[in-house]
Image (cartoon, coloured by chain):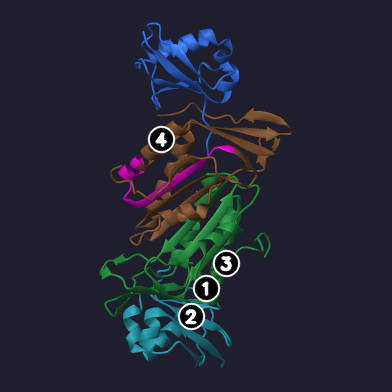
Chain colours: A brown, B green, C blue, D cyan
Amino acid sequence: MGRLARSATREVTGRDIDPTKIMAEVADRDAGGTVVFIGTVRRTSEVGNVDAMEYQAYAKMAEKGLRRIEAEVREKWPVRQVSMVHREGLLKVGEVSVVVAVSSEHRAEAFEACRYAIDRIKTTLPLWKREKIKGKNRWVEGSPIKK
Amino acid sequence: MGRLARSATREVTGRDIDPTKIMAEVADRDAGGTVVFIGTVRRTSEVGNVDAMEYQAYAKMAEKGLRRIEAEVREKWPVRQVSMVHREGLLKVGEVSVVVAVSSEHRAEAFEACRYAIDRIKTTLPLWKREKIKGKNRWVEGSPIKK
Amino acid sequence: MGSVTVLYFAGARDAVGKKREVVRLDGLSTAGDFLDRLLRDYPRLRPMKATIRLSVNQEVVDASAPVADGDEIGVLPPVAGG
Amino acid sequence: MGSVTVLYFAGARDAVGKKREVVRLDGLSTAGDFLDRLLRDYPRLRPMKATIRLSVNQEVVDASAPVADGDEIGVLPPVAGG
């Protein structure tokens, strides 16, 4: 795993995500700033109010992708710790779908690295979501997966 | 308080900060993204390893400033909830000195608003910190306070 | 000869009606040729032709990438995680 | 006439040797004039002259801002929160 910290999470999980746990994993005595992104299922979509959101993942490939994204982040910024987790399965409105936490000496890198990581998660990982609205299912329109 | 949410924190406190509490305050069913910044006391400073950091605040003015910063954020971005807290008193390495949490429909605004808020906290609020290194005290060099 | 395991996701899974299957290569050797065969075999995949991407052993590949016996191929509609 | 409450912070507090005091205005009516008097009364504040700012009733002010009886004045060295 090279420079990847052993205790950090980089997984796709079917269980509830605890943002506090992910945040705790990036604690570091040499970090002055930590930025955490938490994605949650939003009530409103383009076509109405959502009852639930079903996340589907190609988990093995997505977990490889999380490790690749961490390596990209470490290539670009001198961050201390990175931890990332994405849900699969059926989520209710308000539930946590993804958490990215990055700690670094200074805050600028933590903000940039965290934002980069979630952008890459959304565009380069094999993850899909399907809105449940009034008993109907609709795959949320995305973009062709990028390398 | 106008558009300010009643349950959110905007204070300077002498007690331990619980980032989980601040994060929970910005939970919102119409938010898809939440960004949290957590500042912690870093072990290393320009002049050696820090034993502790003493934060001093002009609390009344700083709390006014937090409310002003929230108003600025809401003027600039359509965010859902904002919560901010800053410590005063003596902190050990690794302890939390500041937390800013912002939720919004989409993640771009949450990142931009959170970063703006912490930048404004650092440049426009009457807050100071003094490093304790080997029994000596040194005020951390800052910049003249901005409006 | 040889065969590959194909995994279908999201709208592609709905269109094909299965999550996975083992497919014989029958001499096909590139990802592009393999996708063309899937589109021929599964007409309901054709509307996704422009936006579907393939992975080979969990890496997104171009049409010219090789496919070989034992590979795991993912059929990936546009993604929308987060 | 009138008087103001002055609060000193960080290095200014160390230099002056007190957290707060009540000061008579003695006819001074602007923040700039008030700061000049503090610098005259407290020589140890003078090295900070270029970087100190004053607040009046918890708002940072320019030198031309009025000060009046009952105001709370903050003497603010360069800030470094977070």
Q: Position of residue A10 (x, y in %)?
A: 42, 43
Q: Nearer the viewer, residue C19 or D11?
A: C19
Do residues under tags 2 and 1 come within 8 Å of each other at their CB atoms?
no
Q: Name which residue type carries label 4.
A: Gly
Task: Assess whether residue A87 is covered by the magenta stretch.
Answer: yes
Q: Name which residue type carries label 2.
A: Gly
Q: Would you say residue B52 is visible in this rendering?
A: yes
Mark 3 or 1, closer to the camera? 1
The residue segment tinted magenta is A71-89
Q: Name which residue type carries label 3.
A: Arg
Q: Would you say residue A47 is visible in this rendering?
A: no
Q: Name which residue type carries label 1.
A: Thr
Q: Could you classify mark 2 by the number of other residues whose Cα lies within 10 Å: few (under 14), some (14-19), or many (20 or more)? A: many
Chain bearing tag 1 is B
Location of the C terminus of chain D (image quadrant): bottom left
**Residue labelled with disc 2:** D74
The answer as to whether the residues below labels 1 and 4 share one chain is no
Answer with left or right where residue D25 lies relative to residue B46: right
Disc 2 versus disc 3: distance between alpha carbons?
Answer: 21 Å
The residue at 31%/80% (across/down) is D47
Chain bearing tag 4 is A
Q: Could you classify mark 3 by the number of other residues whose Cα lies within 10 Å: few (under 14), some (14-19), or many (20 or more)? A: many
Indicate which disc residue B10 carries.
Answer: 3
**Residue labelled with disc 1:** B13
Q: Could you classify mark 1 by the number of other residues whose Cα lies within 10 Å: few (under 14), some (14-19), or many (20 or more)? A: some
Mark 1 or 4, closer to the camera? 4
Disc 3 versus disc 1: distance between alpha carbons?
Answer: 10 Å
Disc 4 versus disc 2: distance between alpha carbons?
Answer: 53 Å
Chain bearing tag 3 is B
**Residue labelled with disc 4:** A65
